[in-house]
Amino acid sequence: MTGRVDILVVGLGPAGASAAREAARAGCSVLAVDRRRAAGEPVQCAEFVPRLIGQDVEGMAPVAVQKIDAMHTFVESAAFDRTGGFTGTMIDRRHFDALLVEQARDAGADCRFDTVWECEFKVEAKLVIGADGPRSKVRAAAGLPEPRLIETRQITVPLLDPNNATDIFLSAEIEGGYAWLFPKGEAANLGVGVAPASRSKLKPILEDLRRRLIGEGRIGEAVLGHTGGAIPVDGIVGPEAALPDGTPVLLAGDAAGLTNPVTGAGIPAAVMSGALAGEAAARWIAGAADALDDYAEEIDDLFGASLRRAVARRRELERACAESLPQPADLRRGWIAYPEYWAARPAFPTPEAPNPMEAR
Ligand SMILES: Cc1cc2nc3c(=O)[nH]c(=O)nc-3n(C[C@H](O)[C@H](O)[C@H](O)COP(=O)(O)OP(=O)(O)OC[C@H]3O[C@@H](n4cnc5c(N)ncnc54)[C@H](O)[C@@H]3O)c2cc1C
């Protein structure tokens, strides 16, 4: 593949497709590439988005699967705590990603699948948007470090008691993570994420929870699908950088570390940051010298405070895990459904602060 474009977008997940759409709408020539064979496949997601995402994505109705009215948090074996406010929608993620790519194409972006970006990519671009996910090659090529990544494992199971709540399971056993059961009508996504040091426990933890839920009559025996994936948990990386040849780079979505390090939720941040990166890139191409710095500032304004809180809460919990078994109070302080999470401002970690999970 050879040629010249204004903007090369690497990755056509929610961040890349949103970036390609906005840059093309602003009149830039845009090539967007993805190594996958088709948009959103395979799905690597629990498929929950908050209600407000409807403001950022047009035409969401056909990809919505069911409404979510509340979150139920189970701390160890206690009865669940119900939290309203965490309302949203379970989506069909494959169709969601395909919808965003269709919108980018309608805006005039050239979107190509089965195309892997690498440093020797022959297309010349004035600017590159790295929207290539948690293990971003663009980020690495720009000399930025890879954030720590949480590992996950998820299965889809029959749901015997269809309901409108996301279930969250917190336990000292699930080190540096949590498990979830997210309903999708008559099926549900059942998954778990843990710190890298506990990766070998993913399978047994998921199997224990599956057995427990089968025993409680909540889910059926069948396993309808498997997936997994990585989640960045160190907060913002970049998001402004440059390739070794000087080509400016903007990072968006997971590539920029915008997924929440506690909840793992990253779709809204990917959509928003992608759109902002596309707009900023187009302004820069049109001659606005400050547009890229403005993007970095906007990202910090939008996501900085909540990501720093989440990173700090994660580290507190990791410290508790390293010292002894975390108690229910530690688990509650580390989870967004509890006032303790939002209460006292945590001591934000400095780059020098040792992370006890890494030392194990
Ligand atoms: C198991 C799991 C469950 C999750 N559940 C939720 C949830 O319920 N709600 C939520 O909000 N978030 C969830 N997330 C997080 C969410 O999926 C991500 O935050 C989101 O996908 C980020 O979008 P993105 O566009 O930045 O990256 P991605 O969706 O990862 O897209 C990156 C794209 O880049 C492509 N790519 C990578 N390298 C290259 C290359 N070298 N060349 C070309 N293309 C490349 C990939 O193929 C991919 O399509 C979950 C994550 C996991 C792993």
Image (cartoon, rainbow, N blue to C red):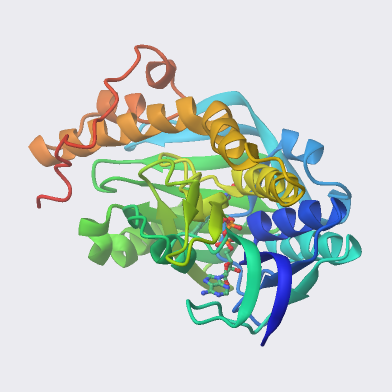
Q: Is residue 130 left or right of residue 176?
A: right
Q: Is residue 3 left or right of residue 156?
A: right
Q: Residue at x 44, y 21 (%)?
A: 338
Instruction: Tell me where residue 161 appears, x and y as whole percent.
Output: 64, 49
Q: Is residue 86 left or right of residue 230?
A: right
Instruction: Tell me where residue 91 appears, x and y as whole percent.
Output: 72, 53
Instruction: Tell me where residue 129 appears, x and y as whole percent.
Output: 60, 58
Q: Residue at x 60, y 42 (%)?
A: 292
Of residues 147 and 242, the one nearer the viewer is 242
Q: Is residue 332 above or below residue 225?
A: above
Q: Tell me if I can see residue 89 in this picture.
A: yes
Q: How many marks?
A: 0
Q: Tell me if I can see residue 223 in this picture.
A: no
Instruction: Tell me where residue 335 appears, x and y as whole percent.
Output: 40, 30
Ligand number 1: quarter of image: bottom right
Q: Residue at x 66, y 50 (%)?
A: 274
Of residues 177 and 108, the one nearer the viewer is 108
Q: Is residue 218 above or below residue 95?
A: above
